[in-house]
Image: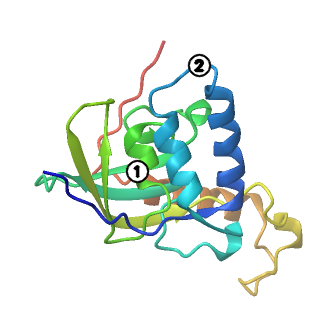
Amino acid sequence: MNTTVELPHVTIATHDFNRLMSVAAMDQNRRKPHRQFLMSELRRASLCHPDALPEDVVSTNAKVTYRIDGSGQSMAHVLVYPEDLLWPGAELSVTTPLGIALLGLRVGDRMPFRTSPGGPWHEVVVEDVRFRLLPDEAEPASKAPDRSGSGNDNSWADLERRLDDALMETFPASDPVSVIVR
């Protein structure tokens, strides 16, 4: 029996699109099994400027909370490029089947994916999208408007406090994080 699944709309920031197209082009010679899935998602995506990407859309450097196959437990990872993986278990590569399936979805969207060619189908549901790092093209902090009213918006103490807040948002104390010391 053939059934047609209507795929959710996908929105990708232009910097992610360009970088992933380069990754897919380089993988062409290596025949990576997930290259075709990545290419199909990039082809059907709507593109937007990184600053115009809605807050509830999954992009790289965003913490996404999701559930697979209706399981009872939600999972959360920061979506990153494979070369940017620093915290195994806390991050998810955007070039894995799950990462490709999540990219560009909105909260509430469902997306089918396979972990291997010919393998069983799974479905991921996006539950939440949080903290998004600024793109490299972001305005330098020295030129950013001072919103604090104190004129110290870029002091070392304030920058460290904002980094600590961002890390706590990304990796709350309730999330198990392993540190490997070599």
Q: Residues within 10 Å of mark 1 (few under 14, many from 20)?
A: many
Residue 160 on image: x %, y %: 65, 56
| Up-down relation of residue 148 to residue 58 (above or below) | below
Q: Residue at label 2?
A: 30
Q: Where 130 falls versus 95 (above or below)? A: below
Residue 22 picture location, percent across and down: 71, 38
Q: Residue at x 30, y 57 (%)?
A: 66
Please report the residue visible at 71 percent of the width from the left and 55 percent of the height from the top.
15
Q: Residue at x 67, y 44 (%)?
A: 21
Counting residues from the start of the chain, the first of labels 2 and 1 encountered is 2
Direction top: furthest residue:
182
Query: Which one is in front, 83 or 114?
Result: 114
Q: Is residue 6 or residue 169 the one in the foreground?
A: 6
Q: Residue furthest right?
A: 143
Distance from the alpha carbon under mark 2 to that under mark 1 = 21 Å
Q: State left or right for residue 92 relative to residue 76.
A: right
Q: Left or right? Give the position of 62 relative to 112.
A: right
Query: How many residues crowd mark 2 within 10 Å: few (<14), some (14–19), many (20+)?
Result: few
The image quadrant that residue 102 belongs to is: bottom left
Label 1 belongs to which residue? Answer: 101
Residue displayed at 19% across by 53% down: 2
Question: Mark 2: which amino acid?
Answer: Arg
**Residue, far front:** 1
Observer able to see residue 61? no
Where residue 94 appears, x then y in whole percent? Answer: 50, 43
Identified by mark 1, the residue type is Ala
